[in-house]
Image (tube, rainbow, N blue to C red):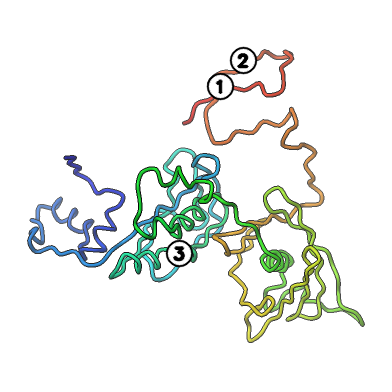
């Protein structure tokens, strides 16, 4: 048996099924009071789940990530315990957990459905997270049936880390957001003489450059051509519809456009005046998979080194 004189990170699950505020109890006991209830007065009701939202790169072996949280919104209907907010930086010096998402239901299936909905409703922009992995795990058939063992993630990791691919509607939405055309009084809402205004919008998703042809018919109507497919964007009663479907939420922060579909699709707005002349495989470009400390440099100034020669580093 293990005895911990502190609250475990999963204590909200206990609180959800017992209705007890363990933090309050801890403070009362520390102040000299007795426990508010005895063991035989406690009951367990329903089921609860907790998902830990981390700034980490799952496909790269769950490596911790860093970055500034440009946008952070938690969905209603779920408990979110967090110590950060939009604008905060996830640094390499502390644990990269962003929040704990907790749901409760009368049945395990009901609690899990609420967790899936809560994860789909989380909006995080600015750093890499494990949100998509958590959503895939919550939807995993074996997990949903309760068939869980310590080898589940390793067995099905390939299916749990599939990178989401943006569809034409996602790209069209990102293009309109990048051009500032989603606002009610967008400065470039589309005035033109005699013929519709046509422009090309450039976006970058992961390592792919995307060119979008935007045909503006008016402030509330645009036709967006993505890979030869036309998406009709129309605003009706203050809401944007893309091919008749309600648009996902979107956030624009600097050069980053995040469409909150499939747990978050990030697009960059390229700066045409700041083209990088180096590629990922160039010898002059040094990339590290995660923050660390250089322990030794096995080369002297002026020494010729072969491609692939590495530095010895250690994780902080």
Q: Are marks 2 and 1 in contact (CB under 8 Å)?
A: yes
Q: Which residue is mark 1?
A: 312
Which residue lies most toward the bottom here? 237
What is the C-alpha distance between the residues marked 2 and 3? 47 Å
Q: Quadrant of the N terminus?
A: top left
Number of numbered discs present? 3
Tell me where residue 88 appears, x and y as whole percent.
Answer: 50, 52
Give the mark nearest the N terminus, 2 or 1: 2
Who's the residue at 86% across and 71% down the image?
198
- Coordinates of residue 40 in the picture (x, y in percent): 7, 61
Q: Quadrant of residue 112?
A: bottom left
The numbered mark, 2 or 3, whose residue comes first in the sequence reads: 3
Of the pair 211 and 66, the residue shown nearer to us: 211
At mark 2, the secondary structure is loop
Residue under pointer 3: 74
Looking at the picture, does residue 303 appear above or below residue 115?
above
Residue receiving disc 2:
298
Determine the residue positioned at 39% across, 56% down: 143
Structural distance between the alpha carbons of marks 2 and 1: 8 Å
The earlier-in-sequence mark between 3 and 1 is: 3
Left-right relation of 2 to 89: left
Dot 1 falls on a residue whose secondary structure is: strand
Against 303, residue 71 (above or below) is below
Position of residue 182 in the picture relative to residue 275 (left or right) = left
* Quarter of the figure with residue 268: bottom right
Q: Is residue 200 left or right of residue 47?
A: right
Residue 227 position in % (x across, y down): 79, 63
């Amino acid at each position: 048996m293990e005895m911990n004189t502190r609250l475990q990170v999963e204590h909200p699950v206990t609180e959800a099924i017992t209705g007890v505020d363990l933090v309050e109890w801890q403070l009362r006991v520390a102040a000299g009071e007795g426990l508010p209830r005895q063991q035989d007065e406690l009951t367990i009701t329903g089921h609860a789940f907790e998902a830990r939202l981390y700034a980490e790169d799952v496909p790269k072996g769950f490596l911790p990530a860093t970055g500034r949280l440009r946008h952070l919104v938690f969905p209603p209907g779920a408990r979110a315990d967090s110590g950060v907010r939009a604008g905060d930086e996830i640094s390499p010096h502390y644990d990269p957990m962003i929040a704990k998402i907790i749901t409760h239901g009368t049945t395990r299936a009901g609690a899990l459905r609420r967790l899936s909905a809560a994860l789909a409703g989380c909006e995080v922009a600015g750093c890499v997270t494990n949100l998509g992995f958590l959503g895939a795990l919550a939807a995993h058939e074996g997990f949903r049936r309760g068939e869980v063992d310590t080898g589940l993630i390793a067995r099905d990791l390939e299916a749990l880390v599939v990178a989401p691919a943006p569809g034409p509607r996602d790209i069209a939405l990102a293009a309109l957001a990048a051009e500032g055309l989603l606002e009610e009084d967008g400065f470039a809402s589309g005035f033109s003489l005699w013929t519709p205004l046509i422009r090309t919008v450039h976006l970058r998703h992961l390592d792919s450059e995307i060119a979008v042809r935007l045909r503006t018919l008016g402030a509330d109507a645009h036709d967006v051509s993505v890979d030869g497919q036309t998406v009709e964007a129309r605003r009706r009663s203050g809401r944007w519809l893309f091919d008749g479907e309600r648009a996902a939420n979107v956030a624009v922060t600097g050069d980053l456009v995040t469409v909150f579909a499939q747990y978050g699709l990030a697009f960059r707005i390229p700066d045409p005046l700041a083209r990088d002349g180096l590629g990922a495989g160039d010898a002059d470009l040094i990339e590290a998979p995660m923050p660390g400390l250089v322990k030794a440099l096995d080369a002297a100034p002026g020494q010729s080194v072969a491609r692939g020669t590495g530095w010895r580093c250690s994780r902080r």
